[in-house]
Image (spheres, grey):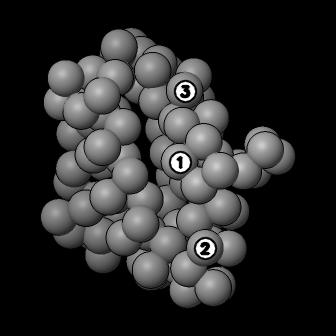
Amino acid sequence: MKFKELIENIELRPKSYLRNESILEFSTLLLGFSLSNHDIDKEEAIFFEHFNAYVNSCYNHDENYNWAYLFLILAGGDEKGALSNFYMNYHKFMSQYCNY
């Protein structure tokens, strides 16, 4: 499975992949997937290289927050709301960087 497919599948059926609809659980799953033994595709490389800076710049943060924690802060601690915010930003990011 490709990285982009994994995110799309989780977005469509989060309970199939996540115990809780949690931004922190989701980010851990993505990191684990990235560290697994598979061929890293263009979208995955771009995501891990640029997404964090993209999110910080979108929300005008000079500090380099981890994207998952930034979404959690912006959602007032609501893990599910933070995950929804991730998907919205992820699609914008991919359309800019990967012609998604």
Q: Residue at x 45, y 21 (%)?
A: 46
Residue 65 x/y as whole percent: 75, 50
| Residue 8 numbered mark, or none | none
Left of 85 or right of it: where is 91? left
In three-dimensional space, the C-alpha distance between marks 2 and 1, rounded to whole angstroms, equals 12 Å
Left of 74 or right of it: where is 65? right
At numbered mark 1, what does the secondary structure look like: helix, strand or loop? helix
Residue 15: image quadrant is bottom left
- Asked whether 43 or 63 is in front, the reply is 63
At numbered mark 3, what does the secondary structure look like: helix, strand or loop? helix
In three-dimensional space, the C-alpha distance between marks 2 and 3, rounded to whole angstroms, equals 20 Å
In three-dimensional space, the C-alpha distance between marks 3 and 1, rounded to whole angstroms, equals 12 Å
Left of 43 or right of it: where is 100? left
Q: Residue at x 68, y 62 (%)?
A: 69
Above or below, comparing residue 12 to residue 56 in the picture: below
- Asked whether 4 or 35 is in front, the reply is 4
Q: Is residue 18 visible?
A: no
For the C terminus, the quadrant is: top left
On the image, numbered disc 1 is attached to which residue? Answer: 58
On the image, numbered disc 2 is attached to which residue? Answer: 74
For the image, the number of numbered tags is 3
Residue 62: image quadrant is top right
Mark 2 or mark 1, which has the lower sequence index?
Answer: 1
Residue 85 x/y as whole percent: 41, 66
**Three-letter amino acid code of the residue under disc 3:** His
**Three-letter amino acid code of the residue under disc 2:** Leu
On the image, numbered disc 3 is attached to which residue? Answer: 50
Residue 1 x/y as whole percent: 25, 32
